[in-house]
Amino acid sequence: MPTTHSFFSSQTVCVTGAGGFIASCLVKLLLKRGYTVKGTVRNLEDPKNSYLKALQGADQQLILCKADLLDFDSLRNAINGCDGVFHTASPLTDDPVEAVEPAVKGTKYVIKAAAEAGVRRVVFTCTIGAVYMDPNRSPDMVVDESCWSDLEFCKSTKNWYCYGKTVAERAGWEDAKERGVDLVVVNPALVLGPFLQPTVNASIVHILKYLTGSAKSYANSIQGYVHVKDVAMAHVLVFENPSASGRYLCTESVLHRGDVVQILSKLFPEYPIPTKCSDEVNPRKKAYKFSNQRLKDLGLQFTPVKQCLHDTVKCLQEKGHLPLPRVRSML
Ligand SMILES: NC(=O)c1ccc[n+]([C@@H]2O[C@H](COP(=O)([O-])OP(=O)(O)OC[C@H]3O[C@@H](n4cnc5c(N)ncnc54)[C@H](OP(=O)(O)O)[C@@H]3O)[C@@H](O)[C@H]2O)c1
């Protein structure tokens, strides 16, 4: 997998929401590859973003700009002068007011600003939640880039995050076509792995709750998982590869929660990891089949989920979010 400078490396790119989990990992990778990065944050003074300035190469190649997804002018200023845009900012919440408008308006504004600035390509970080949420899909069907989540189903299950991201992606494709913008979309599953930011984001909490004792049982649910470094590399690959187009499903595996807690308890038996499913009535939900072949064809080698879980827990320990296991007395 390419990790060094490329033909594109002398270019300037904008990364929206640079202080977030995925975006900061992407910024680190882009800086390493020689790009100049205009990273947007909502508050330039907020100390929570200061870790970005300590990234290798940041002093010379990282420019932080203030921008909000609901403020077109701020996005236009950030995107102006850029060769590419990675639109990663979006709230990770199921609150209908907070989730939908910034996701949809922000994507439309980014496409508009990218068209005005004449950028070469926009990469939009969507989600597998815009792909697989369809109750009418046959259980034998392989989930791939041709699948779309059912908006009525997202609404009726109050999954406003998936609803907002699905509407945002659809609007992105429409606007990009209308405005002649070259758009490529990455649809990651739940993202795990080491994080650079000081706080724990929503996808890391998904694992943290199984280690702290706060989750007494696990849900009868399935979920796709992918390593944050693979997500960052997927963004770079689809940006740099001239023939990349359309959507790219970015998941390494799909597991039942029972499998997740089993892996965790084997790797980290010292934590109070739940052993019971909260649903003792219904049959165990089955993982759907999926294809991540499009990203593999671009050269992405996915990190196994066991490694994702291991790296996540190690990072939680190193950053002080999880107590370190006590060393057993030898006496
Ligand atoms: N993590 C996952 O499992 C996962 C999976 C699939 C797709 N994704 C997608 O990946 C992207 C990043 O997710 P993440 O996990 O890295 O989330 P994160 O750590 O919570 O970061 C989200 C970023 O979006 C910014 N943001 C939120 N609302 C904004 C607004 N109105 N204006 C400007 N910036 C705003 C946040 O800025 P503040 O710091 O100011 O709040 C933050 O920088 C999102 O688009 C998400 O939908 C994530």
Image (cartoon, rainbow, N blue to C red):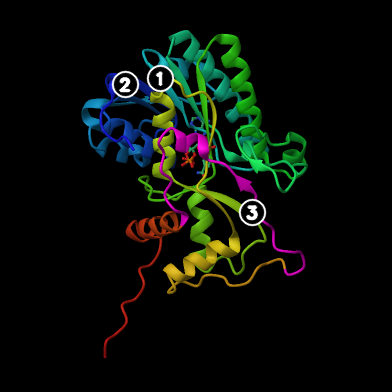
Q: What is the spatial separation of the Cα atoms under label 1 and label 2, in whole angstroms?
A: 10 Å
Side of 91 where 3 appears, left or right: left
Image point (62%, 40%), residue name: 129
Q: Is mark 1 within 8 Å of ligand 1?
A: no
Q: What is the spatial separation of the Cα atoms under label 2 and label 3, in whole angstroms?
A: 38 Å
Q: Which residues are magenta?
A: 280-305
Which residue bears the numbered disc 1?
A: 84
* Circle 3: residue type: Ala
Q: Main secondary structure of the magenta part?
A: loop
Side of 71 where 328 appears, left or right: left
Image point (74%, 42%), residue name: 137
* Circle 1: residue type: Gly
Residue 231 sits inside the magenta stretch: no
Quarter in which the C terminus is drawn: bottom left
Instruction: Please tell me whether mark 1 or mark 3 is closer to you in this view.
Output: 3
Contact, mark 1 vs mark 2 (Cβ under 8 Å): yes
Which image quarter: residue 179?
A: top right
Mark 1, Cα crowd under 10 Å, few <14 / some 14-19 / many 20+, is many
Quarter in which the N terminus is drawn: top left
Which image quarter: residue 5?
A: top left
Mark 2, Cα crowd under 10 Å, few <14 / some 14-19 / many 20+, is some
Residue 20 visible here: no
- Going from N to C along the chain, the mark reached first, 2 or 3, is 2
SS of the residue under disc 3: loop
Contact, mark 1 vs mark 3 (Cβ under 8 Å): no
- Going from N to C along the chain, the mark reached first, 1 or 2, is 2
Residue 30 visible here: yes
Relative to the observer, which residue lies in front, 319 or 240? 240
Which residue bears the numbered disc 3?
A: 287
Which residue bears the numbered disc 2?
A: 8
Q: What is the spatial separation of the Cα atoms under label 1 and label 3, in whole angstroms?
A: 36 Å
